[in-house]
Amino acid sequence: MNKPYDVGFICGRFQTFHKGHEKLVETGLMLCDRLLIFIGSSQEDGTERNPFNITTREKMLKEIYGGRDDIMIYGLPDLTTENDITPAWGSYLLDKVDRYIYKKPDIMIYGNDESRSAWFSKEDLKGMTELIINRSDLPISATMVRDYMVHDQRKEWMQLVNPKLHKMYDELRMQLMSVEYYKKVAEV
């Protein structure tokens, strides 16, 4: 194996898993022997920010990465709310990480849209590398991906997600359109 890091860590809601998320995972796989992926807000579904349930989100990731021994995928419920950007959230997160790998991750990988270091105390960050992936070269968001689904723009949606997910379009759109917020958006 002999990659620069033993265990990398990525945490995201993946509402929908798109090519920007995939870039984070692919970077982690290049740098790390193992990659731990937490699907955040796992207890949430049916809302504007979290339309998809944990089963659907796990299915998307496993459709692309399933069966790999070097990737661990687990749901992670929020501590109190999804806006827990505090060191208490970071401690909670690291406790959950320890449950699966019995140590801190060596590297945390995330996009430059939000500083994950605000999640941790300085003490918690010791010994952990942060790798921030610039999103400007791949300007994509889950909101954009969901918008294409709301307006049934399948071809545009397909350009933003891994081809392995294309067969899930109808299933994903049906779940998305069962959310009251998205029903209203589609009517406009």
Image: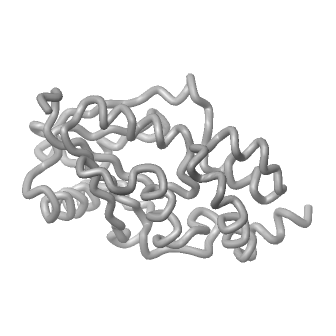
Farthest residue in the top direction?
A: 137
In the rendered structure, the answer to whether residue 175 lies left or right of residue 37 reads right
- Above or below residue 66? Residue 31 is above
Q: Nearer the viewer, residue 48 or 54?
A: 54
Q: Residue at x 19, y 38 (%)?
A: 33
**Up-down relation of residue 27 to residue 184 (above or below):** above
Q: Classify 186 as above or below 124.
A: below
Q: Quadrant of residue 98?
A: bottom left
Residue at left offset 19%, top offset 47%: 121
Q: Is residue 60 left or right of residue 51?
A: left
Residue at 51% of width from left, 58% of height from top? 60
- What's the residue at 90%, 66% (across, down)? 187
Task: Find residue 88 and report its image quarter.
Answer: bottom left
**89 sits left or right of 139 in the view:** left
Quarter of the image with the C terminus in it? bottom right
Coordinates of residue 10 in the picture (x, y in percent): 33, 47
Residue 55: % across, % down: 47, 72
